[in-house]
Amino acid sequence: MWKKLFMLSMVLIAMAGTVSAAVTLTVNTPTANQLFRPNLDGTTYMDINVTFVDSVATNDIHELGIQFSTGDGNVWITSDSNTDYVGSDLNMSSSNCTFATSNVWTTPGADCVIRYTLPTNPQLPSGTYVLDINGSAYTTEMTASTTAIRVFRIDNRWVTSAVEALLLIVPIVLIAALVVGIVLVGFGVVSGQTILILAVGAIVSIIAVVVLSGIMGILTP
């Protein structure tokens, strides 16, 4: 009887150890809602920096799987480097992680960086994306895994939103000035010749702004 109770207690202790075993991920970069502007700022890559902590010192294999969604499906940032396990997870080691103590994954864990080169042809469409970062730990089989989420944004415009807004306002201002000039002619404040010159200048400016806005519309996804 006592032998059975002893064996049962050992099993419960082992199960408790398994339950408490965990990996944690802290996403350092990109920061929440970080904006990347490839055209305007010349940004060519995104560094995904995470702190990876494994509470079980005996786990010797650690992997990260990182992806985000587009209209065509999932885009994997990592690629499968371990054919023994299914997925697109990348092995973490001293080649892409730094440690407080060499290859020790327990607290404070590993500081890991995965560099994602932003595509140029075609570019990622402007919009908001959600990074899905999965961390796993293995001995002979997976012992623990976790997921962290981080939102980032892409803006492929060639001009800032302030410049675009200004381009929309300029024609309105020029038309308003032309109307005011016509009113002033009616009151005899300015001559008809003067307002004619102003009108020609305003029309040329409006055409130039409309053409420039069209060009910006083509260049700005």
Image (spheres, rainbow, N blue to C red):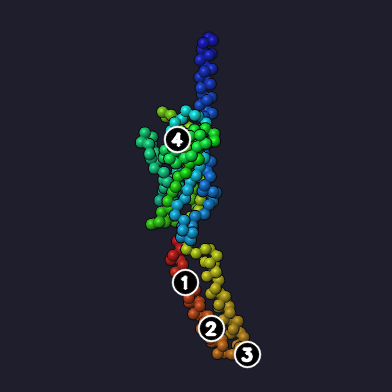
The Cα atoms of the two marked residues, 2 and 4, are separated by 71 Å
Give coordinates of residue 141: x percent, y percent: 42, 29
- Picture disc at residue 212: 1
Q: Earlier in the sequence, mark 1 or mark 2?
A: 2
The Cα atoms of the two marked residues, 3 and 4, are separated by 84 Å
Q: Few, some or many C-alpha atoms within 10 Å of disc 4 (few <14, some 14-19, many ≥20)?
A: many
- Helix, strand or loop status at disc 4: strand
- Picture disc at residue 62: 4
Q: Few, some or many C-alpha atoms within 10 Å of disc 2 (few <14, some 14-19, many ≥20)?
A: some
- Which residue was labeled with disc 3? 188
Give coordinates of residue 176: x percent, y percent: 58, 78
Amino acid type, callout 3:
Gly
Q: Residue at x 50, y 40 (%)?
A: 111
Q: From this view, report whether residue 17 is shown above or below residue 150.
A: above
Q: Earlier in the sequence, mark 3 or mark 1?
A: 3
The Cα atoms of the two marked residues, 1 and 2, are separated by 20 Å
Amino acid type, callout 1:
Leu
Q: Earlier in the sequence, mark 3 or mark 4?
A: 4
Q: Are marks 2 and 3 in contact (CB under 8 Å)?
A: no
- Which residue was labeled with disc 2? 199
The Cα atoms of the two marked residues, 3 and 1, are separated by 35 Å
Residue 186 in view: no
